[in-house]
Image (tube, rainbow, N blue to C red):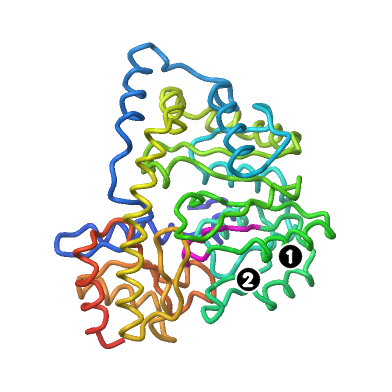
Amino acid sequence: MDFASRLDKVKESATFKYSSLAKREGILNLTQGLINYRTPSRIIEAAERAMREGKTSYTPTKGIPELREKIALKLEEENNIEALGPENILVSAGAKQVIFEAVMALVDRGVEVAIPNPSWVSYEPIINLAEGRIVWLPLKPEEGFIPGDDFLSELENSNPKLIFMNSPNNPTGAVYPKKVIEDIVDIAERKNAWILADEIYEKIIYGEEHFSPASVYDKTITVNGFSKEYSMTGWRLGYCACQEKEIIDKMNIIQSQSVSCATSFVQYAALEAFTKEVKSEVKGMVADLRDRRDLLVEGLDATGLLGYKPGGAFYVFPRLGDGDDINLADRLLEEGIGVIPGSPFGSLGRGCVRISYGFVSRDKIKEVVEKLSAIEL
């Protein structure tokens, strides 16, 4: 059959593919970009209440005003992003949808977009769908996958309209220091480029500080959501903010002609995420994830399989060889371990695998390390 040529450069999501394969009985599933915590009960109860109250119709395309006001206040108080009102906020059906809309609003055929290598598997396909031209910015395991001189040099020598930044990072778990982010902002400012700051793992940080580029640079589209922090992946609720209101309005045109609006009762339920009770639950979850991170990193370090300590999210990205990581992931599945191969995250992911400890209990982490160390890689 004759399909649109834009699909030629887009493949099935590797994360969804391998997550599905790893759901077989007897597999230690380290694939999933989610945590084994239930959505906080207050949020669930608020969703039920909203449905019973009849809040099941369309909402304004940008999202309900109450939620956008809460988000604007949160970004001002916690991220030091000033001059935001409800009209500077767009609520959508997940952070991925927000990123798609931002790229579609800014990127024409041949326009340069700079993204880290490696980076989340969906950045590249979204840019390819917009027919943009990707500039890869190298991240090195020996630098803890934090942008270094080569990253900044490649960025300096390019001419991007849009620069992607993701901290804490998927797939590496790296948290970018403030100075590094300021260096990237400095280049973006001189080139008059936009920054898309994907901050979906913002609250899942272990002892380091999160810094939002939008606090110092107005042409930043800050992307966040409720999926990771509140264990709401299936609820599909994300948002973005920008001090330049025009980009929000342009993205909203795309939203109004695609998903229309985020699910109504989910938006009302999300208001509970800003309560003290729910925030306290999140802190407990993050403390548990930190313990899991420490156990896994210590175990992998002891066997020589990992050479850095991620500062956030719930991933590690070890290099297990220089060969075909797709075949490696397939072989690990046969041995009872489900991981995501590294090359779908970018060429510098070759030989690596992404391990998620978000859905594996602490008592299973020792088993994970023992199995990995026993396999001839």
- The 10 Å Cα crowd at callout 1, few under 14, some 14 to 19, many 20 or more, is few
Residue at point 63%, 71% (across, down): 147
* Image disc number at residue 243: none
Image quadrant of residue 366?
A: bottom left
* 259 relative to 161, above or below: above
Mark 2 residue element: loop
Residue 158, position as x, y percentages in the image: 77, 68
Residue at the farthest top position? 53
Task: Based on the picture, tell me whether residue 295 belongs to the magenta stretch.
Answer: no
The residue to which callout 2 is attached is 147
Residue at point 42%, 43% (across, down): 227
Judged left or right of residue 207, residue 243 is right
Which contiguous range is marked in magenta?
164-174
Residue 51, position as x, y percentages in the image: 35, 17
The residue to which callout 1 is attached is 183
Distance from Cα at disc 1 to Cα at disc 2: 10 Å
In the image, what residue type sits under mark 2? Answer: Pro
Front-most of 322 and 45? 45
